[in-house]
Image (spheres, helix red, strand yellow):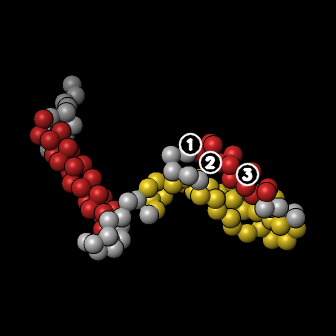
Amino acid sequence: MTTKPKHTTTRLRHGAANRLNHRLSEQARLEKELRDALNGIPSLGNDKQVRLREYTVVTFTVRKDNSGLPRRWEYVAKPGTWESVAEHDARIAARKQGLVIHAHLETTKELRA
């Protein structure tokens, strides 16, 4: 006959207290991230009001006339532009400047004044 081992620890996976603790810790983490993000935004003083807009920035590595080492090149699209449209406009702008696209590095959203 076998006996089941007695567990000395209790797991609170599905209990109400565990859900509450998890929700409170998640809320504290989100508040900390928001505080850190707001502290990173520069302020120009009380007399000037800054309006930040979200721009789509497309980053490529490009070459001039398909020769030499590739260099980093950024294109900033108008606010409210979709990412796919911004990438397409960036390719057109690079070609108009006589640049050959080597690689697409990233497409990001940035807050700018």
Which element is circle 3 on? helix
Of callouts 3 and 1, which one flags the residue occurring earlier in the amino acid sequence? 1
* Front-most of residues 43 and 19: 43
Side of 80 where 30 appears, left or right: left
Amino acid type, residue under disc 3 in the picture: Arg
Question: Picture coordinates of residue 11 (x, y %)?
Answer: 19, 40
Residue under the image location 87 percent in, 63 percent down? 66
Of callouts 3 and 2, which one flags the residue occurring earlier in the amino acid sequence? 2
Amino acid type, residue under disc 2 in the picture: Ala
- Using the image, determine if residue 61 lies above or below residue 47: above
Q: Are marks 2 and 1 in contact (CB under 8 Å)?
A: yes
Answer few, some or many: residues within 10 Å of disc 3's Cα (few below 14, many 20 plus, some between 14 and 19).
some
Question: Picture coordinates of residue 36 (x, y %)?
Answer: 30, 64
Which residue bears the numbered disc 2?
Answer: 86
Which residue bears the numbered disc 3?
Answer: 91
Question: Picture coordinates of residue 76 (x, y %)?
Answer: 59, 58
- Using the image, determine if residue 20 lies above or below residue 109: above
Answer few, some or many: residues within 10 Å of disc 1's Cα (few below 14, many 20 plus, some between 14 and 19).
few
Residue 104 sits in quarter? bottom right
